[in-house]
Structure formats: structure tokens, C-alpha cells
Amino acid sequence: MGKKIILFIRAFSRYGGVESFCYRFYQFLVEKGYEVKVVCGENKTDIKNKNIIELGLWRPGRFLKTLSYYLKASKIAKYSENSLNIALTKVNYCHVIRAGSGSHLDFLMNSLKGYRGYSKFKKMLKRLFSPVNYITVFIEKKMYRNNPNLKLVVFQSNMAKKEFLNRYNLTNLNYKIIPNSVNKNIFKLMHDISNSFYEKYSLSKDKIYVGFAASNFELKGLIYLIEAIKYLPDNVELLIAGNRNPKKYIEKAKQLKIENRVHFLGKIKDMNEFYNVLSVFCLPTFYDTCANVVLESLAAGTPVITTTNNGAQDFVNEGKNGYLITVEELSGKELSIYLKKAMCIKKEHINKNSTLFSDKDIFNNYLNVIKELA
């Protein structure tokens, strides 16, 4: 089949965005008959064979983990002959880089807008004195400016592409946009939702539900969504999926006297049912390279609202499957206007107005890249 392929990932795992991508892509390539190795810092999967090379990570802390993997993995990439090296994390000397997380400096600056008051000041100080931020920016520069092996960078979205080209002045960069995939066998429109889901979370079929799902409530703009509920009719309620501490958001709902309309559900086992219960899914995020929850919601036939700071905006066909709002205009009142408009979009029309890709579609795109470069 030609050259062997080496995938570089710090944590080889079935869980997590880029980790899950690597796991699924590895299996896809093996099934296609390719000789594939994974060079990881930690192997958290049940795959234990000679092709999964576990380097080990220095501890404690993110700085030592990042630095140790970069040094160890870059050495392997630099001296690997007759292989096509694909970086899914921060490592140098690879032929292909999947820029999954966007520019780190842009993330640091844009995501700060999601914090308020003392919380914002504390986050600024923490980032300013966190060495991992400095080493991450240093590594990024090395990967894109001082990489003699670099042949192609794959971006997940137009937003990520624009960030990198501007940030590192990469005028001669060879790049391709390959977006995230969504499992259409799991996420799909359901015409009948089991009563058990409603019963488990004490929900009523007579209500109109707006949904939100994230692991970082501040970064994803939950506070604005709670404020928006205040401007909507009493039969509109908010369902929040995610394991973060909700204490201050519960207090905010109480201040607005809407605590009975804001429900924290914790970790949801069946996210497809969650999306199907909703009339609208809303992620007013301050930074996302390409939020998978937006794609999952669309696949489930639920209209979405997100911001222009989310690379998943590439999938939003305004007025037909959702709406976009800028973070500059983001407020509870303004967001409520978009929610009212999105509620008018019929679920049956979402799939017809959404261009979504399966794992097979996306992995075949990568396979074409591999064939071209091999």
C-alpha cells in the first residue's frame, strides 16, 4: 500500500474530540489495509500492539506533559524514513498537520471575552503566569515556520484557516479544509421520543425547550442564554447538558426569577434524544474551531443558533437551519430575538438545508490526501 502512516497524538483514547478522531481514523486506515502506527504519550485504549508506541509523559502539570511529548515525538518524526507523518497534536517535523484546535493565541484572546468581572481578571492572571501557554505558542511557530517536512495543513473550518494564515503570515502554505464529521446513525430526527426521557428529567411535552451543551459554561456563553429566557414566553424553558458546577448560574436564574425554567441535567447518556426534545439548540460561544454539538443538533433535525466565533458557522444556512450572531451584539435580549426566529424553522426542513459529513466521507478525504502525498 506504499508508505506507512504514523499518527501523532498525545493521548490515544476513544474519548475527547481530537483523541476520538485519531482512534476512529486509525481503525479506518487499518481496515483499508494500510500499515499504521500511533505515536502517543499515553495509550488509554484497549488496543495493545507493537504499532501503538507509548512514549510516556513527564509530570506533573500540563507544561511538562506538553514539552515532553513535543520533544520525544518530534525526534521520532524527524528521523522516521519512508513514512507519512500526520500530526493531530503539537509536534514538529510532520508532513501533514491537522490544525484541530486553531491558533492558541487567538484562542487565548477571543475566549477571554466570555468571562466577566473578577472571573475575567482571574483568568487573565492565570493565563499570563501559566508556562504552558508560552510553550504552546513556541511549538506552533516551530511547526508552521520551521518545519522542512511540512507539505499540507488541514483546517477544520474557514475560521481556523483565516486565523492561522493571519497569525503566522503563512502566505505560501499549502492547505485544505476538511470539516468535522457527525455520526448520522446516532444523531438523527426522531418522530417519537420515549416518555422515559421526559420522566427522567421531569419534563413536560407541553413546554418549548431551548438547549445548551458544553463542558465550559463561561466560554460557551451560557450566562447570555439564561438572560435570554427572561425575554421569552413562560412556556419556554432551558435545558443544560454538561457536568460543570452550575451554582452561579442557578443564582443568576434566581435573580431573574426564572429558576423554575432553567434545568441543569448534568451528563446526558443519549444526546440524540436531548437534541430531539429541543425546539432550538443554542451555543453562544466565544471561541470554537468547529463545535461538534452544532453538527449533532443539525443531524438530529434541530435548528441551531451559534456565533461567528464558531467554525461550525460553515454549516449554518441562515433562516433555513439556524442563525448566527456576533459576540459583539451578544446580549440576553438580542439572543431572545434570534431564538424566536429559530423556533419558526420546521424540523423536517433541517436535514434538507444542512450539508453534513459522515466519518466515511471525511476519512476518505484524508485518504485522498494520503494518496497524493505518498
Image (tube, rainbow, N blue to C red):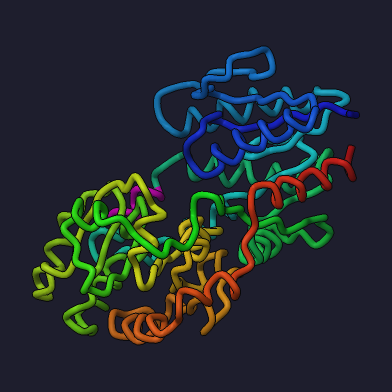
Nearer the observer, 317 or 284 = 317
Which residue is depicted at the point 19% across and 54% down?
A: 199
Q: Can residue 156 be seen in this view?
A: yes
Q: Which residue lies furthest to the top in this view?
A: 50
Q: Is 334 left or right of 34, judged from the image as shown?
A: left
* Chief secondary structure of the magenta portion: helix
Q: In which quarter of the image is the C terminus?
A: top right
Residue 124 painted magenta: yes
Position in image of residue 112 (x %, y %): 39, 62
Quadrant in the rendering for residue 161: bottom right
Quadrant in the rendering for residue 116: bottom left
Residue 273 painted magenta: no
234 relative to 291, above or below: below
Position in image of residue 24 (x %, y %): 61, 37
Q: Is residue 109 visible?
A: no
Which residue is depicted at the point 78% across and 32% down?
A: 32
Residue range corresponding to the magenta coloring: 122-128
Which residue is depicted at the point 54% across and 50% down?
A: 185
Nearer the observer, 81 or 92 = 81
Position in image of residue 294 (x %, y %): 48, 63
Which residue is depicted at the point 31% across and 82% down?
A: 336
Q: In which quarter of the image is the N terminus?
A: top right
81 relative to 238, above or below: above
